[in-house]
Image: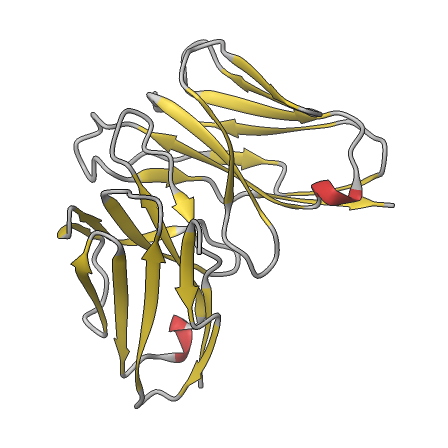
Amino acid sequence: ETGVTQTPRHLVMGMTNKKSLKCEQHLGHNAMYWYKQSAKKPLELMFVYNFKEQTENNSVPSRFSPECPNSSHLFLHLHTLQPEDSALYLCASSQLMADNEQFFGPGTRLTVL
Amino acid sequence: TQLLEQSPQFLSIQEGENLTVYCNSSSVFSSLQWYRQEPGEGPVLLVTVVTGGEVKKLKRLTFQFGDARKDSSLHITAAQPGDTGLYLCAGFNPYSGAGSYQLTFGKGTKLSVIP
């Protein structure tokens, strides 16, 4: 595998379910990110991890819980979501440096019923 | 709060035509990135511009960073159906204070190239 991978690619869940999204980067980067992409809105940064430490949490509701066990893996644990949480969830990684070029995974299309 | 405004929001053109999309801000960025995103996929980095006035070419795509590093443009020559997608610009300013690792994304320009 190369680049940034995400699983699953599609997920349908009920409001009472608990599920997790997984992201893995094979680029040797030291920072990883979760973004939410909804229709008609810019990409919304949710969380940033730098060397496995969470450095940004952009006022994300507690029903989203990130986990970064090492610099290559990132999870987003989901519980008691709302229908408005339906979106494309994108993971990205970068090597923190002057330009912070980010490399994105293909995303998980989440539908909350 | 740093904002990036992209225009136009939507663009539909015939194959072979030229087009320009714009990315504007009142804030200064140390670098600016352009991405293309196809439906159901993540954004793919096309180019990064870092110097005011810089011009970079990627085959039929020409990217320019404004002299003041507040704006950028993407020009496509002789557009092809394969150019169809959402074009996103993203600015990086490590000295912004709030969320220094963040990229500021525009809403994107959705381009359709009709065969």
Q: Residue at x 57, y 61 (%)?
A: B40
Q: Residue at x 52, y 29 (%)?
A: B23
Q: Residue furthest front?
A: A1
Task: Count numbered badges in the picture.
Answer: 0
The x and y percentages for residue A107 are 45, 61
The image quadrant that residue A64 belongs to is bottom left
The x and y percentages for residue A82 are 35, 79
Q: Is residue A86 above or below residue B59?
A: below
Left or right of B79? Residue B92 is: left
The x and y percentages for residue A10 are 49, 74
Q: Is residue B78 above or below residue A52?
A: above
Q: Residue at x 31, y 88 (%)?
A: A17
Is residue B26 something one can see in this rendering?
no
Quarter of the C terminus of chain B within the rendering:
top right
Left or right of B74? Residue A95 is: left
Q: Residue furthest left?
A: A53
**A97 vs A57, nearest the viewer:** A97
The image quadrant that residue B94 belongs to is top left
**B35 vs B29, nearest the viewer:** B35
**B64 vs A100, nearest the viewer:** A100
Quarter of the N terminus of chain B within the rendering:
top left
Is residue B47 something one can see in this rendering?
yes
